[in-house]
Image (cartoon, grey):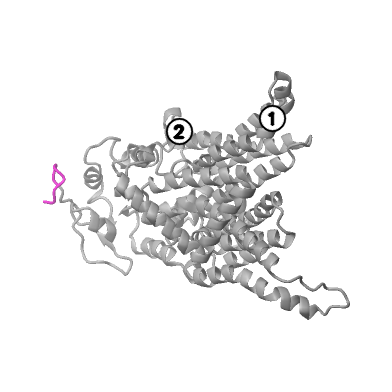
Amino acid sequence: MLAFSAYLTTLAPSITLRHWGIDTGELAVSVHRLAIPHPSGYPVYLLLGKLFSLIPVGDIAYRLNLMSAFFAALTVGLVTWAIYLSLASTTMAPRARMGGALVGGAALSFSFTFWSQAVIAEVYALHSFFLALLVLLLLLWRSHWESRHSSRWAALLALALGLGLGNHLTLALAVPGLALFAILAGLNRVPRTRQEIMHAVPSRVVAWATLLFLMGLSPYLLLAYWAQQGTWPSLWDASTPGLLWEHISGGPFQGLLFSFPVTAALSRLSGAIGFALEEFSFVGFALAMAGIWSMGRHDRPLAAYWLTTVGVSLLFAINYPTFDSRVYLLPVFVLLAVALGWGTAEALESAGKLMPPSPSLSSSQPRAGFLLHWGPLVLLLFALPGYIFVTTRPAADLSGERDLYAFAQGALEVLPQDALLLTWGGQETFALWYRQYVEHERTDVMVVDVALWGWFSYQRSLQRHYQDLVPPVGTPEYVQTLLEQHLGKRPVYATATVASQRCELRIAPPTRQYEFRPVPVRVIDANGRCG
């Protein structure tokens, strides 16, 4: 509740570009209209978002921001529980285990990247939730390994994995670690005969786990249905099985992975370590390293899972060159919080052994004595998350952020009836779509993103909606042809960003503070040079 309260008071009131939120407008439009967002489509997010969009508070974007806060707070609870449960494999005192769990959970809840995704409409808070859920279910499965109910935990784990992949495919990066944990945790129970195998892993358990995993993935089938509906607006055409598979598998972005040279990747690795220090402070990072050491001594399967998942996630994040690469480190930060909890518990256990016996709370001992004994340690315990909270909150707070919404609102007010507006990138296009197709303002304005004109998928999507108002798919000088079709027939405008990016648009002085400017003439030649 403390984490949720912090998120609620810093929640963005609507769409935003802050905290790597370029897609907040697109996701809000996609949830509201059940259109297809960028790859991989995020069907589980869309379905849950649709439920949250029914809450009668704020606008649609605010309700999705609220969903992020809700699942971020649940993630903190799951991580806290997972830390406490994992420490059960040690001989640490209950107070050390509880202290470690609370500090680890609190440190995660107030770390900057995690908090930043808890206050905007993005998929990463839900992604963190599913990662934490997998860790907890894995530990619960192990704790019930010998019971007749263990198969239920295995089935739930399979369902959670499927649903998590339906939100974000990078949850697959946790699978090698899950497999290694299961192998190492079951070494003392390895079946050696066919009868033992059938008893240890009944076919019905495999069948149920497979069925539930596929059920978790089944929301992807909805993308096929929504694609056939051709719901506008969308940058993406997934109307055929081939296009749909390309979309789900992230085809347009696959070429980005491992496109860095080794030296750049090493530099980004150094940057990732720097981000971790910013998230948890030097003390928190040191406690996390101590926690890994402790985990290796007490719980090797969990340590193997931790090292494998962190290693694979790091490898992906540092080799995927996008502007929001830091959010791809969230799985690393979640697992660092688990390690931090272990390190804190180890420190508390060591401190408890060094301290003299504590006075009891019996009638013969005053309560003040107990507080004086443990009070300083408790204060020291919560100083770390308190420090993280104080240093993070100002940067995470988006409660007064309305710049992007004001941009879209003002821009549409400026434009005359039936204008054609050329935009540059999702930061502009998605915000305008939100005002047009969620709040139903100025749908007469035709918005075309010239930064994406070279993508045939976008051209196909435009043609399905606007038909003969846009050039045929594959037209070489797409923007030039578009201007030829409309100049003199309707008002044509471009954003200032378009003006700075594309030389063929000679821009008149700005009309208002929003810097939307009329495009008086077409001035690009066949070679793409300004004439």
Mark in front: 1 vs 2 = 1
Q: Secondary structure at mark 1?
A: helix
Please tell me which residue is depicted at 46% across the width and 50% down the height of the picture: 328
* Residue at image point 39% right, 52% down: 269
In the depicted structure, whether residue 97 falls above or below residue 222: below
Name the amino acid, label 1: Trp
What is the x, y in percent for residue 29?
A: 48, 51
Three-letter residue code for mark 2: Leu
Q: Tell me where residue 348 appears, x and y as whole percent.
A: 66, 64
Tell me: 48 left or right of 152: left
Query: How many C-alpha atoms fall within 10 Å of the one at disc 1: few (<14), some, or many (≥20)?
Result: some
Q: Which mark is residue 208?
A: 1
Residue assigned mark 2 = 244
* Residue 7 versus residue 186 in the image, above or below: below
Q: CA distance from mark 1 to mark 2?
A: 28 Å
Main SS of the magenta part reads: loop
Residue 303 in percent (x, y) is at: 58, 46
> Which residue is outermost to the top?
194
Magenta-tinted stretch: 525-531
Instruction: Name the spot of residue 198 as percent of width and height, x first.
Output: 72, 23
Sequence-wise, the earlier of marks 1 and 2 is 1
The 10 Å Cα crowd at callout 2, few under 14, some 14 to 19, many 20 or more, is many
